[in-house]
Amino acid sequence: MSIAYLVTHSGGFHADEVLSTVVLSRLFPDAELKRTRELDWLTPASDRIIYDVGGDFDAQAKIFDHHQRPCPLREDGRPLSSFGLIWQHYGRGYLAAMEVPAADIEEIHQAFDTKFVLPIDLLDNGALEPSVAGPLSSLTLPTLIGSLKPVFDDPSPTAEDEAFRIALSIARHFVEACVRNLAAKARARSVVAAAVENAGDSAILELPMGMPYLSVLERSGADHILFVVNPRGADWTLNGIKLSNDTFDQRADLPANWAGLTDSDLEAACGVKGAKFCHNARFLAVADSRDAILKMADLAVSEVLQSVGGDKL
């Protein structure tokens, strides 16, 4: 029998069952969402998937709760929420439904689990304090989803279900965007790897378009590459390379005397006709042609070499 119902609890909601619903509703788009605590609905049956409620975890019976004792754990002993359980059992099917290439599904399944699912699992089970996000704690996805709950004195009997559907719509965009970005990184790998090979000993990496490149660059060991150039619409960009995705620090900054300049002022400062813009933080410059941006890149590399000594790079 096909899945006709997606069953989770009524009342207040959290990120784990909202995100679980994102996954399940794509796989079973014709299934009806039932938010309830009625025991008849929380009894496993062939026509339903029950999650974040029911007091049991049994994948064969299609019930995925994590509130019982002992609670289900990952292989490393960390607790799973309903989202983690649903992702383990339905995540690969979800990625296929998102048209992720079969060859990339296992890698992206693991990457999404680490990047997106695990933090939800830990927060929902109290194994991670929201305060680890510091002043951004009120802007984390679980907190933002929770903020969509109706206010305490909303008199509407359907307020919670309506709020859940709003949260579901918003959460869907975040899940799909993360998956698309992971898939894009997988697609970009071969292009970036070829560009790194073509760069050889040059400190400048030229890409055919803007694309994720940092992970490939790190794996390749091409520490000598300092800047990236690529076309952007009718212009070309010159970009610094962050030391990691967790910092704004770069391998090298653009010249200090370019910072914040545009058009004729920037042309005068760098001596390159067609220079258009340099960000004040010196991580991005723009020119109107490939020839102009490569000249700017050469100048930027030369300044770095002069400042640290060419034999140190």
Image: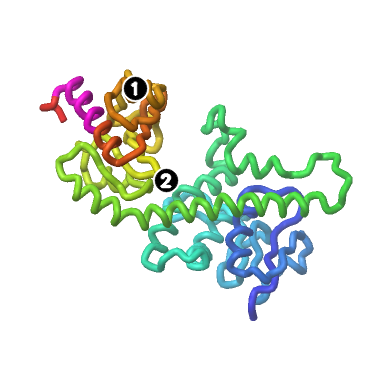
Is residue 100 shown left or right of residue 14? left
Q: Which residue is mark 1?
A: 258
Quadrant in the picture for the N terminus: bottom right
- Give the left or right position of residue 63, taking residue 249 as reference: right
> What residue is drawn where x is 29% and y is 50%?
192
Q: Give the residues in magenta.
A: 298-309
What residue is rendered at 49% in x and 63% in y? Answer: 95
Type of amino acid under label 2 = Gly
Q: In the rendered structure, which amino acid carries the disc numbered 1?
A: Trp
Q: Secondary structure at mark 2?
A: loop
Residue 110, percent from left and from top: 42, 56
Kindly identify the residue that appears in the image at 74 percent across and 63 percent down.
Answer: 34
Q: Residue furthest right?
A: 155
Circle 2 Cα neighbour tier, 10 Å, few/some/many (<14 / 14–19 / ≥20): few
Please give the label number shown on residue 233.
2
Q: Looking at the image, is 293 positioned above or below residue 175?
A: above
Q: Which one is in front, 33 or 211? A: 211
Q: Main secondary structure of the magenta part?
A: helix
Would you say residue 303 sits in the magenta stretch? yes
- Against 42, is 112 above or below? above
